[in-house]
Image: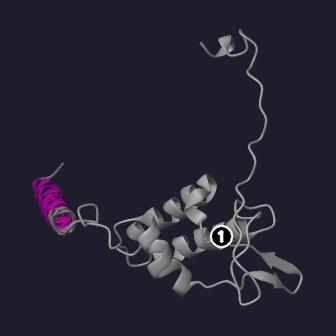
């Protein structure tokens, strides 16, 4: 190897080293920016520390859900929609409505959080109001008559045989 070739190789290596050092500096700055953005989001909170807008599921149902998403109750075309003015007596309805309320409280704090929440709502409303739903035995009050409330009867069950669950251990 000649002195000129050695100098050229040395110069190329130094140039590559400078380019790599510049790339490392650029990536380090990018990492620092991302860490700063994440820290700012954590300081602002993702909504985890914000109190709910509604203090109870009942307040949310009566103040937000029913006025915002009204459904025609009774016979509507080929569909029958059910509602119970004592919806809070139906455990399944309370569980489904509470899940919707919790989801709504979280979704309202996110920029696009309502999109998946609306899909959940669209899934739950036909179950709640439907012919097989938890409110199926009740009817809302109207000009023609008084509201009626009938809790669903319990489904019978039998205990499992004594060793039935032993495979689980």
User: Which one is nearer the viewer's eye here, 101 or 14?
Assistant: 101
- Pointer 1: residues within 10 angstroms few (<14), some, or many (20+)? many
- Tell me which residue sits at (74%, 19%) in the image: 160
| Chosen colour scheme | one colour
Task: Kindly give the residue lying farthest to the bottom in the view shown.
Answer: 143
- Tell me which residue sits at (61%, 72%) in the image: 85
Residue 134 x, y percent position in the rendering: 70, 59
Give SS at disc 1.
loop
Residue 79 x, y percent position in the rendering: 84, 79
- Tell me which residue sits at (62%, 57%) in the image: 90
Which residue corresponds to mark 1? 84
User: Which one is nearer the viewer's eye here, 93 or 123?
Assistant: 93
Residue 63 x, y percent position in the rendering: 44, 80
Quadrant (top left, top right, bottom left, bottom right) of the C terminus:
top right
Q: Which residues are magenta?
A: 3-31
Quarter of the view holding residue 5: bottom left
- Tell me which residue sits at (28%, 66%) in the image: 46
For the image shown, how many numbered marks are present on the structure?
1
Quarter of the view holding residue 163: top right
Q: Is residue 61 left or right of residue 91?
A: left
Q: Is residue 79 left or right of residue 98?
A: right
User: Which one is nearer the viewer's eye here, 81 or 52?
Assistant: 81
Q: Is residue 161 above or below residue 66?
A: above
Q: Is residue 114 above or below residue 124?
A: below
Q: Is residue 73 left or right of residue 118?
A: right
Q: Is residue 34 magenta?
A: no
Residue 31 x, y percent position in the rendering: 20, 62
User: Which one is nearer the viewer's eye here, 77 or 100?
Assistant: 77
Label the magenta part by its dominant secondary structure.
helix
């Amino acid at each position: 190897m000649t002195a000129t070739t050695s100098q050229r190789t040395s110069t190329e290596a130094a140039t590559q080293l400078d380019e790599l050092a510049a790339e490392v500096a650029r990536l380090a700055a990018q990492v620092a920016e991302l860490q700063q953005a994440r820290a700012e989001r954590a300081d602002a909170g993702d909504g985890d520390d914000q109190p709910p807008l509604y203090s109870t599921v009942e307040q949310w149902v009566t103040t937000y859900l029913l006025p915002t998403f009204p459904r025609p109750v009774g016979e509507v075309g080929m569909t029958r929609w059910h509602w119970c003015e004592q919806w809070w007596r139906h455990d399944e309805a309370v569980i489904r409505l509470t899940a919707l309320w919790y989801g709504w409280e979280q979704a309202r704090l996110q920029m696009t959080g309502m999109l998946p929440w609306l899909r959940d709502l669209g899934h739950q409303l036909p179950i709640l109001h439907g012919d097989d739903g938890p409110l199926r035995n009740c009817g809302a009050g109207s000009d023609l008559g008084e509201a009626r409330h009938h809790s669903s009867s319990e489904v019978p069950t039998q205990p499992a045989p004594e060793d039935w669950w032993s495979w689980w251990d």
